Amino acid sequence: MKDIKFARTMWANIQLAKLCPNNDINRLGDVVSTNDFVAQVDTMMSIIQILNESYERKAHFEDDSHEVDIITREELENLNEEELTLLVNKAFEVFGIDGETTVETVPEKTKKEVSPSS
């Protein structure tokens, strides 16, 4: 898996708010806490893509020689649950609510301790 980086910019805030009821970005954690697995995974993938695109846009804005490389939906769909969970938790760390929300999609019994690289 390639190194995925995230940034929280105003562009990202607007896109993330669109995922939430009443565009309330403070409810982002609630949106991924649903029991609807399909909706949960879809939202997790959207969060990863938005925060990754935000990083890439900002990096290109700051240095126009930066080659934009945004993670695709297909790349995300080919991850296993543990890899997706690590990425979304890394994205939430950047978002700034890591202490409030940890997304669990892998049962505790089978989960291995893996720390994502920055």
Image: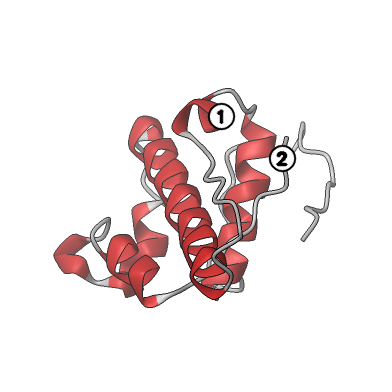
Task: Please state the horizontal and vertical placement of residue 20, each as a whole percent of the image.
Answer: 25, 60
Residue 93: quadrant of the picture: bottom right
Residue 76: quadrant of the picture: top right
Q: CA distance from mark 2 to mark 1?
A: 10 Å
> What label does residue 83 carry, if any?
none
Which type of secondary structure does the marked residue at label 1 adopt? helix
**In the image, what residue type sits under mark 1?**
Glu
**In the image, what residue type sits under mark 2?**
Lys
Q: Nearer the viewer, residue 18 or 50?
A: 50
User: Where does label 1 land, which residue?
Assistant: 75
Which type of secondary structure does the marked residue at label 2 adopt? loop
Label 1, residues with CA under 10 Å away: few <14, some 14-19, many ≥20: few
User: Where does label 2 land, which residue?
Assistant: 2
Numbered marks: total: 2
Task: Please state the horizontal and vertical placement of residue 118, each as a whole percent of the image.
Answer: 77, 61
Q: Nearer the viewer, residue 87 or 39?
A: 87
Vertical relation: 86 (above or below) 62: above
Task: Please state the horizontal and vertical placement of residue 57, each as a whole percent of the image.
Answer: 47, 62
